[in-house]
Amino acid sequence: MLFCEEDESKYRLVAGVDEAGRGPLAGNVVAAVVILDKEKNIPGLNDSKKLSANTRESLSVQIRQEALAYAIAEADVREIDSINILQATMLAMQRAVSALTLEPEFIYVDGNCMPVWNYLSKALIKGDQRIQSIAAASILAKVHRDQCLLRLHEQFPAYGFAKHKGYPTSEHLAVLRELGPCPEHRLSYGPVKAVLDIK
């Protein structure tokens, strides 16, 4: 990976990368990458966690319409259990960037870790609150993952995925203890392992 301390504002094709779904006990981890048009401002971009679901949905549509390029990719629960959540997140980010229709000149990544790739890059803690393209990626990743969990709810309605999106709420943990994990639970995660140890 290439670290850059120079003035990245000189680049036109600047991408932002973020993920959604590192903390949940079930479902895939999702990464998104967005290259925004510097000539077009999208008001309201912010860390997806600070926005309402309706706002995220409407911004997601606008981002898809106005971005120069974007891509969304996933790493599934088997990959998460096999290589750990951090590496699975990096893998999803690599997949997203590889799927772009435009080659980025510079990439911002939210957080303190970056995938291994040959791009000028900079990792920024709380980057989704500082960089518009990361905020846009955060929104796309969150909206996409929420939609995935709604579909997962249709497959396994007893677990309540539509409500908690796989996060370890008291309701989710209670059902998990009662029913055991479904095929989309992350078996390497502590609360899921604890249930398996009991059963």
Image (cartoon, rainbow, N blue to C red):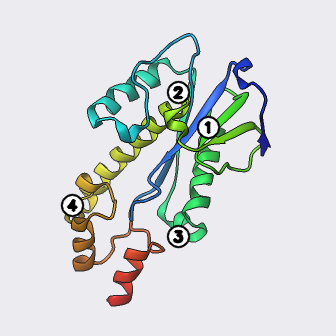
Task: Please tell me which residue is depicted at 65% across the width and 46% down the height of the picture.
Answer: 94
Kind of residue indicated by mark 2: Gln
Question: Which residue is under mark 3?
Answer: 81
Q: Earlier in the sequence, mark 3 or mark 4?
A: 3
Q: CA distance from mark 3 to mark 4?
A: 23 Å
The image quarter containing residue 175 is bottom left
Label 4 residue SS: helix
What residue is shown with label 2? 132
Label 3 element class:
helix
Q: Tell me the CA gap for discs 2 and 1.
A: 20 Å
Residue 49 showing in the rendered view: yes
**Looking at the image, which residue is at 73% across and 27% down?**
105
Residue density around tag 2, few if under 14, some if 14–19, many if 20 or more, within 10 Å: many
User: Which callout, 3 or 1, points at the residue further toward the start of the chain?
Assistant: 3
**Residue type at numbered disc 3:** Asp
Give the vertical position of 70 relative to 19 (above or below): above
- Residue 78 is labelled as none
Q: Give the quarter of the figure containing the C terminus.
A: bottom left
The disc at residue 157 is: 4
Which residue shows up at 43% across the image and 31% down it? 46
Q: Position of residue 18 (x, y in %)?
A: 53, 42
Where does the image place residue 93, in percent across and percent down from the top left?
60, 46
Crowding at dot 3, Cα within 10 Å, few <14 / some 14-19 / many 20+, comes out as some
Q: Residues within 10 Å of mark 4 (few under 14, many from 20)?
A: few
Q: Residue at x 73, y 50 (%)?
A: 116
Kindly identify the amino acid type of the residue bearing the numbered disc 1: Ala
What residue sits right under mark 1 in the picture? 99
